[in-house]
Image (tube, rainbow, N blue to C red):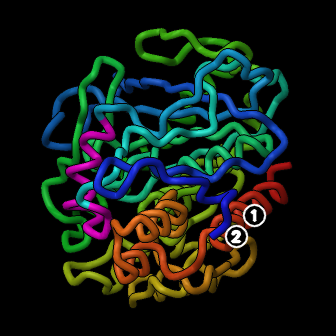
Amino acid sequence: MTAALLLAWTGSASAADTVRLPAPTGPHQVGVTTLHLVDRDRPDPWPDARGRARELMATVFYPAHDVRGYPVAPQMTPKAAETFGWLDVTAAHPELPKSGVDWAATKTHSHVGAPASPVRRPVLLYSPGAADPRTINTTLAEDLASRGYVVVSFDHPGETSEVEFPDGRVRIIALPADPRTHPEIFRAMIDTRIADTRFVLDQLEVLARGQNPDAAGRALPRNLSRALDLRRIGMYGHSAGGTTAAQSMYDDRRLDAAVNLEGYLDHGTAQPGQPGELLPVARDGVDRPLLLYGTDGYRDARYDSSWAAMLAHGGCTMKRVVTNATHWVFTDFAAMAPQFQAAGLMTAADRVKLVGAIEPSRSVPHVRGAVAAFFDRHLR
């Protein structure tokens, strides 16, 4: 591990330790803001909010004109961090430390409300994995913004472990059944995510016209609307977010390129890991660039067959693999898990299960570089 990646832990393992995120590597300082987006034409599909309008939270990372005097954002809000500290570590990611981590103390490298550089930039959307919040892939989003992209990361409430809204409400996961064993839930989840993606694209068009899409009309950073080049839009996503990115590009011509970070391309069956009906993108192929980016440690029949079907179309679809790694190496856990292990809060076996044995000094630059190079090639 390098000092540049891990920096330092504060305190002792018996107290609440602070994990650090790798610094961005691009030439631009990064600004950040959040948007509360409400789709009043679409009811929320999940039981905890059925009948109410669908509402999303999005984080926008962008190259900043000047960051002096603008505070650095936390990775998670206090309420979201509190929920993450009991829900994610018990249900979503049992490998994570059950105690000893101050999840609210982790800082990003992005400055809240800093004015945007008034230069049109390619736009990238990010969709997280099932149950994961958008905040757990801050490292890649910040790096892409530092390289000259506007990155819009958004949750899918009702299937995300926690989403905090501006009024202080925290919505937790509310799926009626496990999508890994109930293909009808997986189908509904992906359909909802694709509709969420379409709505976010619509709201970015509102923003690019100089209007404010935030539901409460909260003030936006200066020049943010001038930073969006909606003629060049890509999308990337992890796990179910990768599924979402690939299928959304198939469905929506506004997306010019996509990266699937180890997401299935079928609907699955009641037997976990077994192949199901292919998604249209894998069945038919797609005429725009798609990168399938996986690991050597996350494999099952469903993954192998759906990716093989996609790759069989050839053309614009390509594949890359991170070795000595597994599924969550594409998230902030790539840098976090080794810190947990070094502090005595995570076993080596749990670290390998979560991200693999690969060191963050290799995995973080590998993922950042491959995703940035793909979008540089196809959007610049």
Type of amino acid at the residue the image marks with label 2: His
Magenta-span inclusion, residue 95: yes
Disc 1 to disc 2, C-alpha distance: 5 Å
Residue 221 within the segment the image draws in magenta: no
Name the image quarter holding residue 209: top right
Q: Is residue 335 left or right of residue 288?
A: left
Vertical side of 208 occupied by 338: above or below: below
**Nearest the camera: 100 or 326?**
100
Q: Which residue is mark 1?
A: 369
Question: Visible in this render: residue 45?
Answer: no
Up/down of 173 relative to 183, above or below = above
Q: Is residue 266 left or right of residue 371?
A: left
Q: Magenta stretch?
A: 80-97
Q: Residue at x 63, y 53 (%)?
A: 22
Please give the residue where the numbered disc 2 appears in the rendered image: 366
Question: Label 2 near label 1: C-beta < 8 Å?
Answer: yes
Image position, residue 52 (x, y; %):
21, 27
Location of residue 207 (image quadrant):
top right
Residue 34 coordinates in the image, percent (x, y): 50, 26
* Residue under the image location 78 percent in, 21 percent down: 66
Q: Amino acid at mark 1?
A: Gly
Label 1 sits on a secondary structure element that is helix
Can the viewer see residue 132? Answer: yes
> Along the line of sight, which residue is nearer the eye, 297 or 90?
90
Q: Residue at x 29, y 62 (%)?
A: 97
Left-right relation of 44 to 374? left
Principal secondary structure, stretch drawn in magenta: helix
Q: Is residue 309 above or below residue 231?
A: below
Residue 204 left/right relative to 4: left
